[in-house]
Image (cartoon, grey):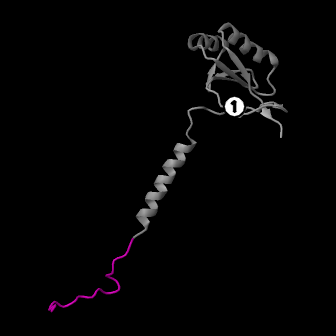
């Protein structure tokens, strides 16, 4: 026989689960994941590529040179000049060089990069375009 008196809890003494810390923790985790998702080692610029009717999407491990509308160059997202590009290509000897030139860039700037790639004995040169819709 149980001789102890049962103690009943009042309405304000009952246990409850506080969800505020849980929500705060989940928001912090989502924020952390969102920052990681949008963090990229490659810098993307607003280069408007010319369109082509034929073309395919490829994933390549290659060196990327971007040519901006004013004729300046970016090597792997960093401002560069032709001499630096040529030295980089000779030193690293990449198999593929991807040239992304803005559609308004004069042809001569693309030819300059192609000439430096030839001197550095790059095997393949890819010129980026965007596919017509």
Q: Image check: 66 left or right of 26?
A: right
Q: Position of residue 49 (x, y in %)?
A: 77, 31
When the figure is inspected, residue 1 is found, relative to residue 95, above or below; the finding is below
Query: Is residue 96 or residue 25 the one in the foreground?
Result: 96
Q: Position of residue 26 (x, y in %)?
A: 46, 58
Q: Image check: 18 left or right of 61?
A: left
Quadrant, the N terminus: bottom left
- Farthest-out residue, right: 53
Query: Is residue 102 or residue 79 the one in the foreground?
Result: 102
Q: Measuring 61% from the left and 26% from the top, which residue is drawn there?
A: 61
Q: Quadrant of residue 9?
A: bottom left
Q: Measuring 33% from the left and 77% from the top, which residue is drawn there?
A: 15
Give the crowd class for mark 1: few <14, some 14-19, many >=20 residues within 10 Å.
Answer: few
Q: Position of residue 63 (x, y in %)?
A: 63, 22
User: Which residue is disc 1 drawn over?
Assistant: 58
Q: Image check: 75 left or right of 106?
A: left
When the figure is inspected, residue 3 is found, relative to residue 130, above or below; the finding is below
- Farthest-out residue, top: 119
Q: Measuring 57% from the left and 43% from the top, which residue is drawn there?
A: 38
Query: Is residue 75 or residue 62 the one in the foreground?
Result: 62
- Whether residue 10 is in magenta: the answer is yes
Q: Quadrant of residue 73?
A: top right
Please state the extent of the stretch shown in magenta in the rendering.
1-17
- Whether residue 76 is in magenta: the answer is no
Quadrant, the C terminus: top right
Q: Secondary structure at mark 1?
A: loop
Q: Position of residue 72 (x, y in %)?
A: 70, 21
Predominant SS of the magenta segment: loop
């Amino acid at each position: 026989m149980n001789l102890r008196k049962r103690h009943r809890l009042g309405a304000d003494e009952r246990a409850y689960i506080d969800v505020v810390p849980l929500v705060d923790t989940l928001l912090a985790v989502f924020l952390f994941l969102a920052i990681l998702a949008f963090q990229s080692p490659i810098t993307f610029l607003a280069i408007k590529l010319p369109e082509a009717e034929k073309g395919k999407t490829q994933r390549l491990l290659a060196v990327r040179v971007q040519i901006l509308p004013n004729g300046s160059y970016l090597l792997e997202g960093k401002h560069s000049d032709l001499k630096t590009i040529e030295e980089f290509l000779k030193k690293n000897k990449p198999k593929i060089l991807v040239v992304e030139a803005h559609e308004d860039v004069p042809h001569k700037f693309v030819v300059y990069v192609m000439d430096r790639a030839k001197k550095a004995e790059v095997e393949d040169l890819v010129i980026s375009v965007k596919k017509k819709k």
